[in-house]
Image (tube, rainbow, N blue to C red):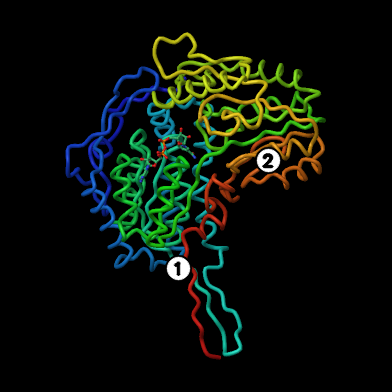
């Protein structure tokens, strides 16, 4: 059993200040963010909400650090040393990070453990790129040579969602820092704590003032931040609707932006799939963290001939997930993060019923007196045109869609405005790879979903723009300059 989180464990700085210009700064207004327990539905405590004036101060600090501070002028190897040190500070606090994640949004221990285990690798991976990435190269020209230089893009706003607040911040922050950028991080109003604790890590290693600033805020103050003309780049993870708006704001002043948005990813169970291997591999990634993860495999494409067999096996696996108190070790699914998520998922359950899909299991709240619970739900008889097959529900709801042959499976997988993730299950790896090549998606795994900091992650179509992870993730924070030199 995970030790329950007590707000008294947090430092006074995390509970009552912002991190701006290397200082713990008191808020300029008395606006607050209430943190509501997804389990008890009660306010647990509150922290200050950044107002536009706080945002302005954070951008000023980041601009000053970029224009006049040492950070962009250090070598990548020097910046990498800070990353390594910060990663060590993060490792010391991994247990606290896991517990604040559960307290804020109800993630279960098994999932938070798996994701938290990846976090230190982001620091070491990006620090390692300092050695191998070609920040500068010379190319011969008829008049002499050109030196091609990768420079930091400038001051970056990192806008974060509530579902995986630490790893999504780290996936942006590590490449931004290695590149030499300075950063204003705006965590989501529901999960302000992770970024503030990360600021304590930055403080502990003496990151130069203004390089990393943290200002938790609601959407309005976030909008003020992205509209600031001193912001050179916005990196956003969240809903497609907010991403579209942020893209339009940035396009207006030709600021750089990258978007990591939603998904409606397909798990393709092939005719020859070994269900004894495929079902245990697909179940945890079909509704991880109650389905509130962008890469969830929420459409399961199954061969018509084997549909009953697949549905029976998948139903048995889903029904064996223990739903309940996320602090308990044997619980595989907790409540949803917040009431608006629960309402949204219930709306989609109604939509699915009205569209004529059949609920195989779940479909209700379960026997809980409190908590934003939704039972893990499987819809059968789903056709690709239904809204539950097309729209991101962001809850523990999977649609089973039958296909006649492989061509049709690929066609259905691609019949989506999204293209973020995907999986293929077959013992024939050549077949699996051939199918994977034909699905229009940014990431697809054969026989079990994989994620790694060294590999680019991001979406096709409305799932986003740009990539995080790998050298491609670093390039998102670099501008290219060519200096022509005589022979
Ligand atoms: P959202 O996109 O509205 O919020 C995400 C972050 O963006 C938050 O920090 C929010 O304050 C900020 N934001 C929103 N509008 C902004 C603006 N105009 N300017 C600056 N910042 C802005 O997401 P949500 O309302 O929390 O969730 C709604 C839906 O979004 C979910 O149900 C799900 O479908 C999707 N979602 C996807 C992901 C993902 O990982 N891709 C994460 C969270 C939510």
Local SS, label 1: strand
Q: Nearer the viewer, residue 207 or 462?
A: 462
Residue 232 shows up from this direction: yes
> Separation of disc 2 and disc 1 at Cα?
33 Å
The label shown at residue 374 is none
- Horizontal side of 287 relative to 302 (left or right) equals left
Q: Earlier in the sequence, mark 2 or mark 1?
A: 1
Q: Which residue is mark 2?
A: 445
The quadrant in which residue 92 appears is: top left
Q: Position of residue 320 (x, y in %)?
A: 61, 15
Residue contact between numbered discs 2 and 1, judged by CB atoms under 8 Å: no
Q: Position of residue 275 (x, y in %)?
A: 76, 25
Residue 87 shows up from this direction: no
**For mark 1, does the 10 Å Cα neighbourhood hold few (<14), some (14 to 19), or many (20 or more) residues?**
some
Q: Is residue 453 depicted above or below 338 in this figure?
A: below
Q: Quadrant of ligand 1?
A: top left
Q: Is residue 312 depicted above or below 24 in this figure?
A: above
* Residue located 71% across and 18% down the image: 313
**For mark 2, does the 10 Å Cα neighbourhood hold few (<14), some (14 to 19), or many (20 or more) residues?**
some
- Horizontal side of 262 relative to 26 (left or right) equals right
Q: Is residue 268 depicted above or below 323 in this figure?
A: below
Q: Position of residue 58 (x, y in %)?
A: 27, 52
* Residue located 36% across and 35% down the image: 191
Q: Which residue is mark 1?
A: 151
Q: What is the quadrant of the C terminus in the image?
A: bottom right
Local SS, label 2: strand
């Amino acid at each position: 059993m995970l030790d329950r989180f007590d707000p008294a464990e947090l430092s006074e700085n995390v509970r009552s200040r912002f991190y701006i210009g290397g200082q713990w700064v008191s808020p300029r207004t008395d606006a607050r963010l209430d943190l509501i327990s997804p389990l008890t539905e009660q306010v647990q405590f509150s922290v200050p909400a950044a107002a536009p004036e706080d945002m302005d101060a954070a951008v000023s600090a980041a601009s000053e650090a970029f224009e006049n501070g040492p950070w962009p002028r250090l070598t990548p190897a020097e910046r990498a040393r800070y990353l390594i040190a910060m990663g060590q500070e993060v490792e010391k606090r991994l247990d606290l990070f896991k517990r604040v994640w559960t307290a804020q949004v109800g993630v279960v221990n098994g999932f938070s453990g798996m994701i938290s285990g990846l976090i230190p690798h982001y620091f070491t991976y990006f620090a390692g790129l300092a050695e191998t990435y070609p920040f500068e190269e010379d190319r011969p020209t008829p008049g002499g040579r050109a030196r091609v230089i990768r420079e930091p893009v400038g001051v970056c706003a990192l806008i974060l969602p509530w579902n995986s607040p630490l790893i999504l911040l780290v996936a942006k922050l590590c490449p931004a820092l290695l590149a030499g950028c300075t950063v204003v991080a705006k965590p989501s109003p529901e999960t302000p704590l992770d970024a503030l604790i990360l600021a304590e890590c930055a403080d502990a290693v003496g990151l130069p003032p203004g390089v990393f600033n943290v200002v938790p805020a609601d959407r309005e103050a976030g909008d003020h931040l992205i509209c600031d003309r001193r912001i050179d780049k916005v990196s956003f993870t969240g809903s497609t609707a907010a991403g579209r708006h942020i893209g339009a704001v940035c396009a207006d002043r030709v600021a750089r932006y990258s978007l990591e948005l939603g998904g409606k990813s397909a798990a393709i169970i092939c005719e020859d799939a070994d269900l004894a291997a495929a079902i245990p591999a697909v179940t945890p990634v079909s509704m991880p963290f109650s389905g509130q993860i962008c890469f969830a495999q929420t459409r399961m494409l199954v061969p018509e001939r084997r549909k009953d067999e697949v549905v029976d096996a998948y139903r048995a696996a889903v029904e064996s997930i223990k739903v309940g108190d996320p602090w308990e070790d044997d619980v595989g699914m907790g409540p949803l993060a917040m009431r608006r998520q629960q309402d949204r998922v219930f709306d989609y359950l109604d939509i699915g019923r009205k569209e004529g899909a059949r609920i195989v299991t779940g479909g209700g709240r379960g026997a809980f007196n409190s908590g934003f619970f939704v039972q893990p739900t499987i819809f059968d008889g789903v056709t690709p045109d239904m809204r539950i097959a097309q729209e991101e529900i962001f809850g523990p709801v999977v649609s089973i869609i039958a296909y006649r042959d492989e061509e049709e499976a690929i066609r259905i997988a691609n019949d989506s405005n999204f293209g973020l993730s995907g999986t293929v299950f077959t013992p024939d790896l050549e077949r699996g790879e051939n199918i994977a090549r034909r699905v229009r998606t940014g990431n697809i795994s054969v026989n079990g979903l994989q994620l790694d900091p060294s590999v680019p992650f991001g979406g096709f179509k409305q799932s986003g723009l740009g990539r995080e992870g790998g050298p491609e993730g670093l390039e998102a924070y670099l501008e290219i300059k060519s200096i022509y030199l005589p022979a």
